[in-house]
Image (cartoon, rainbow, N blue to C red):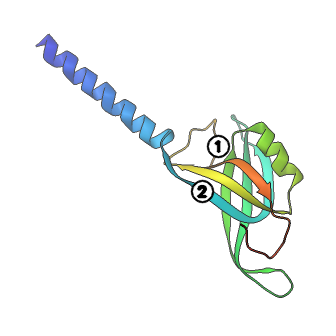
C-alpha cells in the first residue's frame, strides 16, 4: 500500500512539474517583429517590469504614415535591452522575441519577451 501511495505521489509531482514548465518556461514560439517602437515603461504595483509597445504597420501611405497597423505588446527582462529601447522610442526597430504560454508576475505582464533588438536605418523599407 505504501509503495502505491509513493508511486502515485511521484506521478502527481511529475505531472505538476511538467505543467508548470509547459505554462511558464516552455518557448511556444520565437521570431522577429519589425515596427515603430511607440512606448517602453517601467511599471507595476508590487513587481516592477519593463513593458513595451510597438506599432506593426502593414501598409504605409505616401507620407510614411501607417494606414493598417496592429500593436505588439511585450515585456523585457534584461535591463540593458530595456535601456537601449528607452533611447530608441519613436524609431523603427527589429526585435527578437520569445513567446511563452503564460507569465509570472515578476517577469512581466505579457507572454512575449523581447531579448534583443536592432535599428532599421531605412524607414519605409523592408527589413532584411
Question: In the shown orientation, is residue 115 left or right of residue 10?
Answer: right
> Which element type, helix, strand or loop, lies under badge 2?
strand
Question: In the shown orientation, is residue 33 left or right of residue 120?
Answer: left
Q: Residues within 10 Å of mark 1 (few under 14, many from 20)?
A: many
Q: Residue 91: give x, y in percent of width and height.
A: 85, 63
Q: Residue 54: give x, y in percent of width and height.
A: 73, 62
Residue 111 appears in the rendering: no
Cα gap from disc 1 to disc 2, whole angstroms = 19 Å
Residue 52 appears in the rendering: yes
Q: Residue 72: give x, y in percent of width and height.
A: 66, 62
Q: Residue at x 78, y 55 (%)?
A: 118
Q: Earlier in the sequence, mark 1 or mark 2?
A: 2
Task: Spot the residue most to the right.
Answer: 87
Q: Residue at x 47, y 42 (%)?
A: 26
Circle 2 residue: 31
Report the front residue among 75 and 93: 93
Q: Residue at x 71, y 55 (%)?
A: 95
Which corner quadrant holds the C terminus? bottom right
Q: Residue 82: give x, y in percent of width and height.
A: 79, 44
**Numbered label attached to residue 108:** 1
Which corner quadrant holds the N terminus? top left
Q: Is residue 68 above or below residue 44?
A: below
Report the front residue among 15 and 106: 15
Task: Spot the residue most to the top.
Answer: 2
Q: Residue at x 84, y 43 (%)?
A: 83
Question: In the shown orientation, is residue 126 left or right of residue 64?
Answer: left
Task: Spot the residue most to the bottom.
Answer: 62
Amino acid at each position: 500500500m505504501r509503495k502505491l501511495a509513493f508511486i502515485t505521489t511521484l506521478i502527481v509531482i511529475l505531472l505538476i512539474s511538467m505543467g508548470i514548465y509547459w505554462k511558464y518556461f516552455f518557448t511556444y514560439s520565437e521570431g522577429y517583429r519589425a515596427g515603430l517602437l511607440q512606448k517602453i515603461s517601467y511599471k507595476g504595483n508590487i513587481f516592477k517590469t519593463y513593458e513595451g509597445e510597438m506599432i506593426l504597420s502593414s501598409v504605409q501611405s505616401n507620407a510614411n504614415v501607417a494606414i493598417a497597423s496592429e500593436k505588439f505588446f511585450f515585456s523585457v527582462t534584461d535591463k540593458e535591452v530595456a535601456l537601449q529601447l528607452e533611447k530608441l522610442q519613436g524609431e523603427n526597430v527589429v526585435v527578437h522575441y520569445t513567446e511563452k504560454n503564460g507569465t509570472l508576475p515578476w517577469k512581466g505582464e505579457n507572454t512575449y519577451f523581447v531579448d534583443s533588438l536592432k535599428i532599421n536605418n531605412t524607414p519605409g523599407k523592408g527589413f532584411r
